[in-house]
Each structure stands twice: as C-alpha cells, then as structure tokens.
Image (cartoon, grey):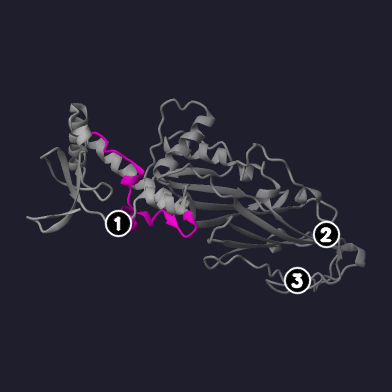
Amino acid sequence: MARHIALDVLVAIKIMAPEYASSASARARFEREAKACALIKGPNVVQIQDYGVADGPFLVMELLQGEDLSARLARERCLSPAVAAGLFLGVCKGLRRAHELGAPAPPVKDAHLLRTAIRCRASRIRRSVHEEGIEYMGRWRLENITIFATNRTSDEVLGHNVHALFRMRYDASRIGRFHETPRLVWHEHIICMEIRGRPSPSGDAAGADAITPVAAQTEESRTWWEVGVDQYARNPGSPNFAPWLARYREGYRSAVGMPGSVIRGGAQLFHRRGGDANPRTENVNTADDQAEASRRYLGKKGGILTIEIHDVPSIGLSGEWDVKERYLFFTLGVQGGTVWRRVRQHLRVDKSLPPDLWTRTLEVEPLEPGVQPVWRTNVDTTGFTRVDPPAHLTQVNPPLLAGGEFV
C-alpha cells in the first residue's frame, strides 16, 4: 500500500519479485497482465492506474479494502451457496469482458477475490439471491387464468364447453438448468342427485346455493353421491390434460408457424415481452426435438407459454332416472401459485319437462391473490340415500410418460 502523490489517494502496488524479474518470459507475462487489466473496465475487475519499470516491473492499482477468498476460506472453511454463486458470477463477468475485448484473461486466484467486490455488486446480485440462497433454476409464474364457456347440448348430454387459458411466464436464470413447469391444479368437487319416480310439483330447485329435497314415491328412489378429485393427479393421460412434453411441442409449433394442434386445447410460445418467439429450427425434426427446442429457448431467454385446457363438464341424458341434478365446483391454478379461479356449474334435468326448462348455469369467481378456495357447497341432501360415486371418477390412471413430465 502506498499513497499516489499526484492524486493524493491510497493505492496498491504490485512489484515483481527480484528472482522473476530477470526472466524475459515472466516480465512479458507480467506486462500482459497489466494490459489486460487496464483494458477491462467494470466493477468485477480491479482497475489499473499505472505501469512502469524501476528495479523491476510494477503495477499501480486501486486499493480494495476487504477480506480475500483465501482468508475467508481459512476462517469459514465452506461458503454458503448464495455467497459462492455471487462470487463466481462476478468472476465470470470479468472473464467474459476480457474475452469480448480480445484481451488476455487476468489471473484468477483465491487471494485475488475480495469480499469487497461482492458488496459492490450487491444491487445486481440481489435479483438472483434470495433469503434461502440463489435461484439455481429459472422460475415459472402463473400470471393469469382466463375462462370462457359455451353451452354444450345434444341428444346425449347437457353441459358446457369450458376453455381455461393459463398464461405462464418463465424467468430464465443466469446459471443452472431449466426448471420444468409446475403442475397445474384442476380440482373438482361433484355432488350429484338422482330421482327415480315422478317428483311432486314443488320439487324444483329452491335457490342458487341450495336444493329443496324432492318428494318421490319412496325413499329408495332418491340417491346422491359426492366425490372430490384432482384431475391432473388422477388422470394424467387424459387428452384434456396433455403431458407437458406435448405442451412444449405445441408451443414450438405455434412459434414457427406450423399449422394444427394435435392435442385438445393447445399451447403457444411467446417472447418474454409478449411478441413472437424465435426458437431455433436447425436440426429440429421430431416431436421430441420440438419440445427440447422450446425448453432451450425458455431456459436461455425466458418467455411466455400460454396453455389452453378444454374440458366438457356435462351429464349424460341416458339412464333409468327421471330427475338428475349435479353441482360441480372446480378450482384452477398451479401448485405453489398465487392465482386461482373457482368455477361453479349447476345442471338439472327433469325428463318430464321440455329441455328449455332444464337448468344450466356456470359462474366464474376470481379469488384474491394467494387465497386458495374453501369449499362451501351448501347442498342439502336430506332425504336422499348416499351411494358410491361412479368408479371411473375415482380411478387413478398411470401416466403416459416416465419422469413426471405429465405434471
């Protein structure tokens, strides 16, 4: 350490040891180091203020006060992931700048890495380091869920076509690998009542949130069942809930203008600012290649993936019953997310009445961010005998793909 007379500041001086000063190759290497450091301007590389030769070559550098890495390792023995990652981010930035300028890379040793440098970069590192440590992988965020529905009517069913559009944003990480999409949540809670035998004239629904038990010929003619299932966990092979591999593939096809969706619903890949995405197209031949191209694009640049789920919640009109009434409550979101939508569907068919007097409603309720829904079905089943739900609603099917890609 010395004081620069002209500038009146403290500086650090690096002097080549006498035993190396006589070596031409060592002097040339010392000079290359000085030129490299002088070319690179930035917070991650010490700044060179002067270079000269007296009794031997010397460098005049800015003086950094702090603890070098070798001393810290001797004291702590092991660094936390956040500190280590932040330190190496700065090293990599400095080396990258050297390569961009075509300068020889400056030497990197543990004694050359100061804790001061990490503090100087705190504002930039803060974006990647969290209380638990650094985000080694990118991060998905569910920004919005848009739901729209149309009536679905035929000789066989009464219900709705429901389209749910999930807008997912991926923030790429500067280090680490691509993080697969979080599992979507599509939780359904169903209450269904059937009546065999003619109802009384007063047997209509009493309100939007309650059912007045319908008088029938005998108690045994009135049955009800209830079931709650997460469709993604129960039925990962359903065409409604296509594997993520298919979603990545559909996103690629939309970005490069390939026509036609091969799955119900679909997916689209966009630039992180909402414009067109441009995933690589070289050597992309198979469906697996297309999915991997989407992954690579998102992992490198980040982006937006919109996922459309098309479901058809309905009741069949066949069967030995006279009145069927069904309430369906389903909640949409992503595992660990803060955006949720709750949908309520009410269907009631009385075969003694014309179809235009049947009940069919669907309501969408946005929930406050971070608030998961609490089921308040408030359906009165007094006078009905409970039975087991249909087996196909609770059967757990095996996934189509290994490795959890369906979630």
Q: Classify mark 3: helix, strand or loop.
A: loop
User: How would you rate the neighbour count of disc 3 (Cα within 10 Å): few for under 14, some for 14-19, many for 20 or more?
Assistant: some
Residue 403, quarter of the rendered image: top right
Would you say residue 361 is visible in this rendering? Answer: no
Q: Which mark is residue 120?
A: 1
Give whichever of discs 2 and 3 has the lower sequence position: 3
Mark 1 neighbour density, 10 Å: few (under 14) some (14–19) many (20 or more): few
In the rendered structure, which amino acid carries the disc numbered 3? Ile
Tell me if 22 is positioned left or right of 264 in this view: left
How packed mark 2 is, by other alpha carbons closer than 10 Å (few <14, some 14-19, many 20 or more), is some
288 relative to 311, above or below: above
Which residue lies under the disc numbered 3? 211
The residue drawn where x is 32% and y is 51% is 114
Q: Distance between the Cα atoms at labels 1 and 3?
A: 66 Å
Q: CA distance from mark 2 to mark 3?
A: 16 Å
The disc label shown at residue 46, or none: none
Front residue of 50/41: it is 50
Query: What amino acid is labelled 1 in the image?
Result: Cys
**Comes first in the chain, label 1 or label 3:** 1
- The image shows residue 405 at horizontal and vertical percentages of 60, 41
Q: Tell us which disc is closer to us: 2 or 3.
A: 3
Looking at the image, do the residues carrying marks 1 and 3 touch, with CB atoms under 8 Å apart?
A: no
- Does the magenta portion include 306? no
- Distance from disc 2 to disc 1, alpha carbons, whole Å, reads 76 Å
Residue situated in front as seen by the camera: 184 or 250: 184
Percent of width and height locating residue 106: 26, 38
From which residue to which does the magenta span run?
A: 104-133
Residue that badge 2 annotates? 322
In this view of the protein, which residue sits in the foreground, 323 or 388?
388
Q: Of the residues shown, which amino acid type is indicated by label 2?
A: Asp
